[in-house]
Amino acid sequence: MKRIGTPLAVLAAVACMMAGAPSATAAASTSTMIDIASYQTGISVPATGVDIAIVKISQGNYYTNPDHARAIGQAQITGMGVGGYDFADTSVDATVEADYYLARIMRYKGTGFLPVLDWEPSNPCDVTWARTWLDRVYSRFGVAPWIYMNMSTEA
């Protein structure tokens, strides 16, 4: 039988969960992340000291960050969590944009790479576009994408 911890530690974790307090495990699992945008070309990803790097890959069906492969490579070599985002342009068809993004990330399939949609449109409540993009990326890449947005978009 696998031992999960001392009875006192297990009891303390259960008590914290019942009280609504974060457990020691939850506190210990906090990670730091950096968003590496196009204007940060050449940044030393390992020097940031973060746990996760999310790199801008594309925007619409017309822009590719020329530095994304280098930044992702640095993050992967150092063992960081890594993902890449598409900055949504809702004037472009969602499937067309997803395919443009997918063409740039398929080389990372099966590596633990996390696909991300940066969702900051002028009308964030119209989520049909986002749903189409998310479904397309998931069906082709096999990993459920994150949605990345600022708090004003969330509200």
Image (cartoon, helix red, strand yellow):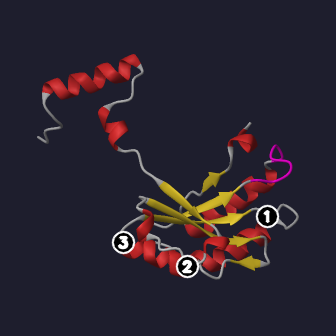
Q: Mark 2 or 1, which is nearer the eye?
A: 2
Q: Is residue 73 left or right of residue 146?
A: left
Q: Which mark is residue 78?
A: 3
In-front residue for pair 63/93 = 63
User: Going 73% across and 53% down the picture, which residue do you hit?
Assistant: 131
Q: Mark 3 or 1, which is nearer the eye?
A: 3
Q: Separation of disc 2 and disc 1 at Cα?
A: 30 Å
**Sequence-wise first label, 2 or 1:** 2
Asked which secondary structure carries label 2, the reply is: loop
Asked which secondary structure carries label 3, the reply is: loop
- The stretch of residues the image draws in magenta is 120-126
Residue furthest to the right: 91
Residue bearing mark 2? 42
Q: Separation of disc 3 and disc 1 at Cα?
A: 33 Å
x and y percentages locating residue 94 in the rendered image: 79, 64
Q: Are marks 3 and 2 in contact (CB under 8 Å)?
A: no
